[in-house]
Image: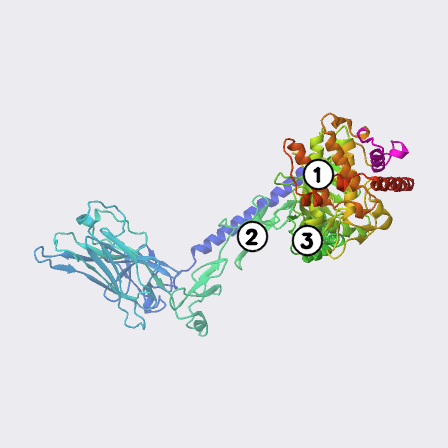
Amino acid sequence: MKLKEKQVQMGLYLKQRLLLVLLTAAVAASAKTQPISKPKCPTKCGNVSIPFPFGLTKHCSLNTSFLITCNQTLSPPTPFLNTTYENVRVLNISLDGQLHVSLPVAKSCVVDNKTGESYNEVIFIMFDRPFHLSSNQNKLTVLGADTAGVVYDQDSRSKTRYAPTSCVSLNTTIYNNTHDDSCSGTFCCETPIQHRLSEFAYISASNIFDDNYTKPCGYAFLVKEGAYDFSITDLINFNRSNTFPVVVDWAVGNTCIDAQKNASSYACKSKYSECHNAIVGPGYHCKCSIGFRGNPYLPHGCQDVDECTEESHDCLKGRSICINSPAGSYSCSCLKGYEGDGKINGSGCVSRSNRKIIIALSVSGSILALVGGTLYLCCTLKKRKLNKLKEHFFQLNGGMLLQQQIGRHSDSNELTKIFTVEELKEATNNFNEEMVLGEGGEGTVYKGILPDNRTVAIKKSRISNPNQIEHFINEVILLCQINHRNVVKLLGCCLETEVPLLVYEFVPNGTVYDHLHDQTKSLRLTWKRRLQIAVETGGALAYLHSATHAPIIHRDVKTSNILLDHNLTAKVSDFGASKIIPLDRSQLTTLVMGTLGYLDPQYFHSSQLTEKSDVYSFGVVLVELLTGEKALCFERPEAYRNLAVHFLSSMNEGRLLDIVDSRIMDEANVEQLMDVANIASHCLRLKGEERPTMREVAMGLEEINIVEKHQWEKVNLSSEETENVNLSSSSFSVDGVSRRSMHSSSDILNRISLSLTSGR
């Protein structure tokens, strides 16, 4: 069955090919008889075809302007265009509106070597109205030494006459003996001619610059651009009888609109012709419509072009045949067993057996396109939703409040940068747990590496309800105002996530708490280093209390909020619980916040926050540095769980050295230990008004540090400085009253510790 089907297909294909051959032969036969001239009119003069509207007689031409004279005496016979003064030889006629003619050469020579008398020839040409020189395809060329050529517009019928065009070829051998074969001014020059010359003259003039009368003759002629190649030998061997081709533009009538009003004078006679106004000058041209070819000036001049025979079609070879249409087009027909439009650039011809596959592929492609479009739409909607979510988080995380606060504190430093969540995700490997530096009550801190290779600490705040937003914004505003070497620097923030993010400078050596209590992370903190940490931390807190535009209470001073950089310099961090106290107030009533073991007892009971609350917490930090013990430890006996209580009790009983960290006993000066302990005990007084200020504490610690550094020097202070600055025994003496206060303070601290413990 398959063999029989193939035989049938082959027979049909052979029949179609035979039909195609017959059609081709018929079209070829008709093409041979395609007219170019009027009936019974000669079509050639010698080797040149004479298409209508041109003709060799008045009857055969459109009018006398298109009359061609055929000189039969020449061999071969030569056509001439009838012009005034000169009969111009016709080289070629194109129905596209151009013909090629040859024009004579104007010669100029010195006829008397003594007097310099010269002969200068002038050539006059007068075309009929339909003809004019093509200005963009012809050049005036001058050949000779010190020879000039000029073209004049002689058309007296024109309202606008064009200025002459001139060109001068120079004799540069007077100055140098070098030359080349380019027509660039030396012995030869060329220049474009004027626009639309119909009546014109051109002249050659020699020996125009000096009295050397022995120079060769000069020549001026018009020539089609590119048809003449200059050679230096032409100065001597130039044959004046040589002619050069020139392009002449022609057109009929005036305009298409005017011509179409009068059918008898309308030159486009063919049914399948179109009228086009001439690009240059008046008149129009007739052209055959697309799919037709021939002479549009004759009634049956435009005939159908058989694209099938000219191989200009795009029918798919081997699977389709080309069928010409008399209406000027063609179609492609697929062979039996194939379907499609039969064109190379179309659907082609596809075997019916493969139709199902093509349909399946088309359906699959459509489905893929639909799925792809759906995914793109989903991604676009998701991206839009994500942007809206970011904006929602910005509002939810206090973006407006932050802007208001920044506007309110206009004198503060601006944030270094507002980070995007994508930047911080990339910096922390999508907040990987391996990047966690630590966790606290206010949030989690991650280590991050920015694109510029800066290492930063990124704090993801732990905010469980909108009321805590204020604490986060508070930390941002506070850190914007703080510029101190012992306070962690804020680099920027991000509000586009569900929980807000703060970006700090990275402090590499962890917290003081870690090095005091965690043996796996600890560095050995000598007494000298501990004293330096106390001095730097006290100075930072004193700065917060007194050097900013309004006092800032940290409210959570503890060793885990004191970081150490690569030089082990202390830096105070975590300002999420901090408060600004207005200048006109000395305390604030707030919700009690802080860390168990460091919390000021007076603040705990009264909710009255003052600067002295930080002083108390710092006193606990000093005791930690002295003892190396945790502020609150439930592994110790109940009486010693609270370090502040244990410390005050030991001070009262004269057992301070029993609780000092054994790791520093061998290197520390006992007198210095006692001085620092004396300051710590005053910081831990129950009543806030009995505690020293942070400035006094910082200056006292600084004095101790200076003495430790310069033991050979004695610090001489005036009595006034001693009274106001020196935290001496008169200021921090443990007298009877102080001891009673310490006892009562210890009792209260024990009760607070027990109550907080039972609450846990």
Q: Quick one: label 2, few (<14), some, or many (20+) residues within 10 Å?
A: many
Q: Position of residue 399 (x, y in %)?
A: 72, 54
Which residue is depicted at the point 65% across and 53% down?
Answer: 412
Task: Tell me the colour scheme of the image.
Answer: rainbow
**Marker disc for residue 287:** none
What secondary structure is the magenta-colored segment mainly? Answer: helix
Residue 564 versus residue 478 in the image, above or below? above
- Which amino acid lies under the numbered mark 2 shown in the image of this protein? Ile
Residue 723 versus residue 643 in the image, above or below? below
Element under label 2? strand
Disc 3 marks which residue? 549
Residue 132 belongs to the span the image colors magenta: no
Q: Earlier in the sequence, mark 3 or mark 1?
A: 3
| Distance in Å between CA atoms under marks 3 and 1 | 25 Å
Can residue 700 be seen in this snapshot? yes
Q: Quick one: label 1, few (<14), some, or many (20+) residues within 10 Å?
A: many
- Which amino acid lies under the numbered mark 3 shown in the image of this protein? His
Disc 2 marks which residue? 323
Q: Which residues are magenta?
A: 633-657
Q: Kindly indicate whether the residue at mark 1 contacts the one at mark 3 (C-beta within 8 angstroms).
A: no
- Which amino acid lies under the numbered mark 1 shown in the image of this protein? Leu
Residue 650 belongs to the span the image colors magenta: yes
Q: Residue furthest bottom?
A: 262
Q: Earlier in the sequence, mark 2 or mark 1?
A: 2
Element under label 1? helix
Disc 1 marks which residue? 701
Q: Position of residue 617 (x, y in %)?
A: 78, 42
Q: Kindly indicate whether the residue at mark 2 contacts the one at mark 3 (C-beta within 8 angstroms).
A: no
Q: Position of residue 363 (x, y in %)?
A: 71, 47
| Distance in Å between CA atoms under marks 3 and 2 | 95 Å
Element under label 3? loop
